[in-house]
Structures are given as structure tokens and as C-alpha cells.
Amino acid sequence: MLNILKFPDPRLRDKSRKVEKVGRVIQDLAKNMFETMYDGNGIGLAAPQVGELVRLIVLDIPLIDPVDPQKTKRDPLALVNPQIVWGEGNIQYEEGCLSCPELVVLVDRMKAIRVSYLDLNGKPLELAATGLKAVCIQHEIDHLNGILLVDKISRLKRDLYKQKRLKIAKEEKDMATVL
Ligand code: NI
């Protein structure tokens, strides 16, 4: 399990670098990111959130069984060097983020996108996504560019949220010292 960096950790603000070679290191990182994401009940995770400044994101928007909508199936997807090559429309979705606990923000995104990327074998591919999947990919690509959910709220709200997070981080640190 990997440690997820939380706002306002300055490392979340760095721009991630392109992956030059998809090999064992990236494959292992993706595997650990999936486990960390599932453990946190997230639907997406970007490498910089676990302190690795590389352009890798993982997501899993569960597939709903057409016969029995109560049943869902995992649909893990890892994208290396993802790039939005086309997009249109508008969708608003209430987003959360594992790096911004207890924050839910209604964000404007493109409704449909096409993304070019490399898979975990280094093969160049393209995919089309709409709805929640498109939202999730755009959110994770933001992370690769140092953009966070807190950037989508007002300066005043962001300052309040920052103070709250710093207080919690300090308490957790004090706790760690005691234990
Ligand atoms: Ni996030």
C-alpha cells in the first residue's frame, strides 16, 4: 500500500514528467496504485498523489451488469502519458479526491473525450470516454499538471480548507509522536 499525499503537500503541485520507457518499474507502480486506490474506495489515482512524478494514472469505473444492475464488475484501466486529443460538451459532476479529504466540489468538465496513451506494455492506443469516465480521466490528468480539486473553489473557501487540513495534519503528527 502506498501513502497518499494530502493537500497542501507541495509535491502535489509539481508537474509530472513523461514516461520514456514503460517497463517493470511503471508496471509495479500501476499495480500498487490500483491496490491503494481500491483500499481508499477511490475510482481514480494519479502517480503524483503517491509521490511519483510520472505521467501515469489508474482508474476503475465499475461496469454495471445489463441484466442485473445491482451487480458490478471491475474495469481497471492504466494510462501512461495520457493526452486529451479531442473533447466536446459539458458535464457537471460532484467530485471528490483522495488527496483532498472531505471536500466535494461541483466541477465543469468536457462530457466526451478522446485520449491517446500508452498501455502497460508500452503500446500506443486511443480510447473514447463519456460521463463519469471522462470526468475521472480529466480529474487525474489535472493531477499530472499539479492542478487539484481545491483550485476549483473560491480563494476564501480554499484558505479555510487549507487551515482545516493543516490543523488535522498537525494533530496527526502530534499523535504519531505520542504513539
Ligand atoms: Ni484526485
Image (tube, rainbow, N blue to C red):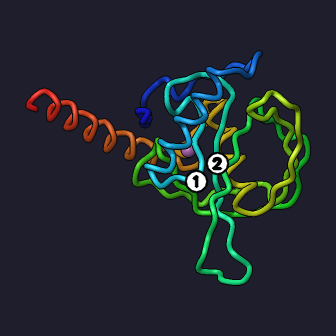
Relative to 156, does residue 66 appear above or below in the rendering?
A: below
Q: Where is residue 80 in the image (x, y as percent from the top left)?
A: 74, 31
Image location (x, y in percent) of residue 115: 84, 43
Considering the image in quadrants, where does the C terminus appear? top left
Whether tag 1 and tag 2 are in contact, CB under 8 A, the answer is yes
Question: In the figure, 126 relative to 3: above or below?
Answer: below
Which residue is most to the top? 20
The residue at which mark 2 appears reads as: 59
The CA distance from mark 1 to mark 2 is 5 Å
Image quadrant of ligand 1 equals: top right
Residue 106 x/y as whole percent: 59, 60
The reply, left or right, for residue 90 in relation to residue 136 is: right
Task: Please state which amino acid type lies under the numbered disc 1.
Answer: Ile
Q: In this view, does 146 lie above or below 142?
A: above
Q: Residue at x 75, y 63 (%)?
A: 131
Which residue reaches farthest bottom?
67
Disc 2 residue type (three-letter): Leu
Q: Are there few (<14), some (14-19), or many (20+) residues within 10 Å of tag 2?
A: many
Which dot marks residue 73?
A: none
Residue at 61% across, 30% down? 146
Q: Which of 138 and 116 is in front in this view?
A: 116
Instruction: Describe the element under mark 2 as helix, strand or loop.
Output: strand
Mark 1: C-beta under 8 Å from nearest atom of ligand 1: no
Residue 50's place in the image compared with 43, above or below, is above
Q: Which mark is residue 43?
A: 1
At 69% across and 75% down in the image, what residue appears? 65
Residue 10 appears left or right of 127: left
Horizontal side of 90 relative to 31 (left or right) equals: right
Residue 37 coordinates in the image, percent (x, y): 51, 46
Q: Which of marks 1 and 2 is nearer the N terminus?
A: 1
